[in-house]
Amino acid sequence: MSRPPCSPIDPHREERRSPHPLPLSPYAVILCGTLGIIHLAGCSGESLVAVSGEVSYEGNAVEIGEIRFTPIEKTPGPATGSAIEGGRYAVSAERGLLQGGTYLIHIEGMKKSGRRAPNPITGTSIELMENFIPVEYNAESTLQVTINDGSSSQQLDFRLPQSP
């Protein structure tokens, strides 16, 4: 027994409605998202600066870690940061710091702890890492930097310990 050809209108099919009052095309969603990113990136004329540099602790490069810049003193915008690898970090201009902005700096350096734990995915044993940078440079940091006006990039090196 053969089925009749499908007609474009099936009287037994339920009509499905979009949950949105106005259906949006994928292009409209992309356009709105792009405009939102442009606005957040500083369409008000504020310029973002790429920052990069070296991080060391007690004269040795921080091989693995993280650096974060948190805006303070009425500096607008989100916190940003970068991984530290081989004693170096880099924050691109797209995720950079605001010219003239002041930022609180948090630095963490990781080293093997000597303790092991099971990997929750594979079940194999992995060595745990721990932060070896003192709290006065991360959780209780008072390190601050103000980004110079007029430059598209800035070199910021951190040689710890230094007076916070």
Image: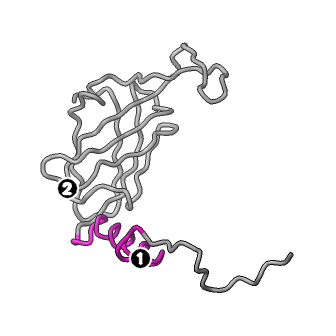
| Real-space CA distance between mark 1 and mark 2, rounded to the nearest whole angstrom | 34 Å
Residue 68: image tag:
none
Looking at the rendered structure, the secondary structure element under dot 1 is loop
Percent x, y of residue 67: 37, 40
Percent x, y of residue 49: 32, 59
Q: Nearer the viewer, mark 1 or mark 2?
A: 1
Q: Residue furthest right?
A: 1
Is 98 rendered above or below residue 84?
A: below
- Quarter holding the N terminus is bottom right
User: Is residue 150 or residue 94 the one in the foreground?
Assistant: 94
User: Is residue 146 or residue 66 the one in the foreground?
Assistant: 66
Residue 41 is a magenta residue? yes
Which residue is denoted by mark 1 in the rendering?
Answer: 23
**105 sits to left or right of 1:** left
Residue extent of the magenta highlight: 19-45
* Crowd tier of the residue under label 2, counting other residues whose Cα lies within 10 Å: few below 14, some 14–19, many 20 or above: few
Which residue is denoted by mark 2 in the rendering?
Answer: 76
- Residue at image position (58%, 20%) is 127
Percent x, y of residue 123: 65, 23
Looking at the rendered structure, the secondary structure element under dot 2 is loop
- Quarter holding the C terminus is top left
Q: Amino acid at mark 2?
A: Pro
